[in-house]
Image (spheres, grey):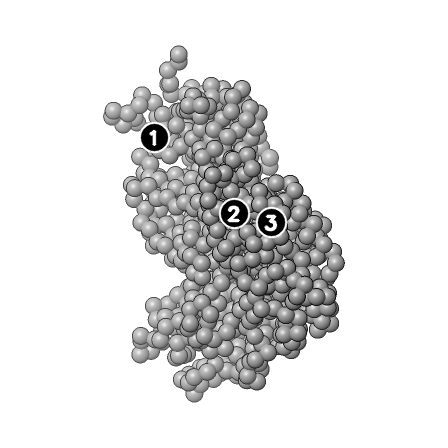
Amino acid sequence: MTTANLPDTPAEFIVLHSRNSSLVLEAHADEAPIWRYWGPRLPDGASPGVPLRDTRPLPSFNLDFDQPLTLVPTFGVGWFGQSALLAHRAGRDFAQAVTRCEVEWLAPARAVVLHLTDAVAALRLDVTLRLDEASDVLVASTRLTNLGDDALDVQWLAAATLPLPGQCDTVRSYAGQHVHEFLLQTDRLSRSLWRRESRRGRTSHDCFPGAVVTTPGATDDAGLVYGAHLAWSGNHQQTIEWLHDGQYQWQLGEWLAPGEGRLAPGASLQTPEVVATLSSAGLNGLAANFHAELRARLDWPGGAMRPRPVHLNTWEGFYFDVHPEPVKALATAAAAVGVERFVLDDGWFHGRHHDRAALGDWWPDETKFPVGLGDLITHVNDLGMEFGLWVEPEMINPDSDLYRAHPDWALQLEGRPLITARNQLVLDIARPEAADYLFDKIDALLSAHPIRYLKWDHNRDLTTAGLASGLPGYRAQVHAVYALMARLRAAHPEVEIESCSGGGGRIDFAVLRHTHRVWTSDCIDALSRVDIQRGFLQFFPPEIMGAHVGTAPAHTTGRTQSMAFRCAVALPGHLGVELDARHLSDADTRELRGWIQLYKDLRERLHGGRVWQGETADGVVWQAHGDAADELLLLAYRVRPSTHRYTPALRLPMLDATARYHVQEIAQPAGPEGVWYHTAIPHFVELRREGRACDGAWLAQAGLPLPRELAETAYIVRLRRV
Ligand code: DGJ
């Protein structure tokens, strides 16, 4: 028996730098590295100088040694905070402690693996940290290996444990539901534990796996803020906990169902990645970092993103009632307004006439498409559009040929009732024969036809997700869907995939390694979308944000907005149309065509650059896209009627104070409906006609005058540096 004492092994400081951030760990040979710093960039060569324990007197009635926060804080070292690992071997080896630390550099000052062994509990943790120079994004993950002779049961393994400085005071996370994703929830940090969990078996609408933590005074554009996201499409958990040295620890990881983390001798458990970053330039600075990381992950056909084609999606136009002639007529109408990709949504496959049957039977319905899909696809292609197809591979209806042939292929628990949602069950695609079946069916469609796009849906939560063995199948299911997507993409590299899950139930950095667009929400009401898109853009860039012009009144809210407002709100995303374009009035058709053309003119500027967002006290929500050193597009949405007699000017803090900008209003296709009070005011007339040069400093500090608009209108302006 040995007693714990102050370690006398020498300290090695592990320092990672990026352009605007640094992290410092203090490594000793016989324990997990101690977190010393994660914050704004330190100068090269800056060092804590002394080991942490040499700087902290022990408090009264404490353990007889000092146990600071480490990269992997574990129960067995005398750590009273949340442990990064909860595991045991039939009740034994329950208190882990790292006994050996080896440092392996992958890239100097950029990427490192910490190999941490617990010789007593017989396990190893390999923690990989990569800090990207350009984006300031830290990608961290952990691999746990069972070195013992018996199985190890893992209840919790943090993908990463991050330190947050004590001045952090607020956490912004995202709640939600079907038809309202990214519902901002703001909580004060305190000595109480802050925790969000999702056990729905997918990324979820209800609990986005990530958050933003702010320090006092932080705004959209200034102040120190931290963000982290778990790149994972299954169950998850995150915790922020106050510690007795005044800082916080933030753990993110996969929520494991009981039994799901059982590791046989020699087996490993690899966590998902945590994508974390910080910025001294407020929420917009943080968003830029996340956008850069996500853009680096996207795997585009041909290696690079092409201008995002305008979609038409048939769902809200037809629902399940898709028949060749009306669909062809819709395609013709879509092409006439400028649509470039036509997506046939649900309802096309064998026996699918409503949401009660057919999932699993992935071949064209013989009554609706007696000659298959080829004729329709040729029609769409002849109109100059690509063809896309909706599928929901991971699901099965009890009323389907597939279920009748293989009832055992559904995730289920023997002796328990099958719990349906939207009348469907979840297919156990970790079964090779089920994955092969899906691959063969989808591959046959993609091989037979020039289908360039799949809208890949997933419309229910996982409940009693038992594998054939009776073990839980949540994480196996997530890995299996990634594998199936990767296999299909390898066989059909020209095909893009959209991640949809009843709208935005599967939006995360992991599924986006295999996909290229997300269906942000089933809610296309433009007012609701302003809110949803604002949360979305905190983490994800606009070019992957499926944003459609819906019908009025909106199907999911009953609210009506003008065509101009619906188009203006969809404009900055990946634009699409989701209405029956056959029956638009001539005026609406002209206006929609005009907006689509405007999108085509602006998309290169809207996509790929930075995005700044903000909100005024007077009901204007705005976003600016582009490059402040060159050209920006400003979209200001008046979401509420003004409560001011004079509309306050809009400050644009991202502008270069030493530069001048040529400012010009972008004319909206048919002009917004309603009265435009500003039309006779000289400044607005000039901005609309030829534009004028303005001081960057003035616009940044005093602001751009805003017109006195009606509610639910947009004002779009181009600012070009002169
Ligand atoms: C849910 C999606 O979010 C919708 O866009 C549509 O594809 C339906 N599923 C089809 O069932």
Above or below, 7 relative to 260: above
Secondary element at image label 3: helix
Q: Residue at x 49, y 61 (%)?
A: 521
The one of 136 and 139 positioned closer to us in this rendering: 139
> Do tag 2 and tag 1 residues touch (Cβ < 8 Å)?
no
Three-letter residue code for mark 2: Ser
Residue 436 visible? The answer is yes
Label 3: how many Cα within 10 Å (few below 14, some 14–19, many 20+): few
Judge from the rendering whether residue 356 lies leftward or rightward of residue 227; answer left or right.
right
Three-letter residue code for mark 1: Phe
User: Does label 2 point to a residue whose CB lies under 8 Å from ligand 1?
Assistant: no
Q: Residue furthest bottom?
A: 680
Give the spatial CA distance, label 2 vs label 1.
30 Å
Judge from the rendering whether residue 70 lies leftward or rightward of residue 609; answer left or right.
left
Q: Nearer the viewer, mark 2 or mark 3?
A: 3
Q: Which is more N-terminal, label 1 or label 2?
A: 1
Three-letter residue code for mark 3: Arg
Q: Which is more N-terminal, label 1 or label 3?
A: 1
Image quadrant assignment for residue 469: top right
The one of 512 and 641 positioned closer to us in this rendering: 512
Q: Which residue is mark 2?
A: 233
The label number, if any, that marks residue 80 in the structure image: 1
The picture places residue 73, in percent across and down from the top left corner, at 42, 31
The one of 233 and 399 positioned closer to us in this rendering: 399
Secondary element at image label 1: loop
The picture places residue 305, in percent across and down from the top left corner, at 64, 59
In the rendered image, which quarter contains the N terminus?
top left
> Do tag 3 and tag 1 residues touch (Cβ < 8 Å)?
no
Q: Which residue is mark 3?
A: 404
Q: Residue at x 66, y 74 (%)?
A: 325
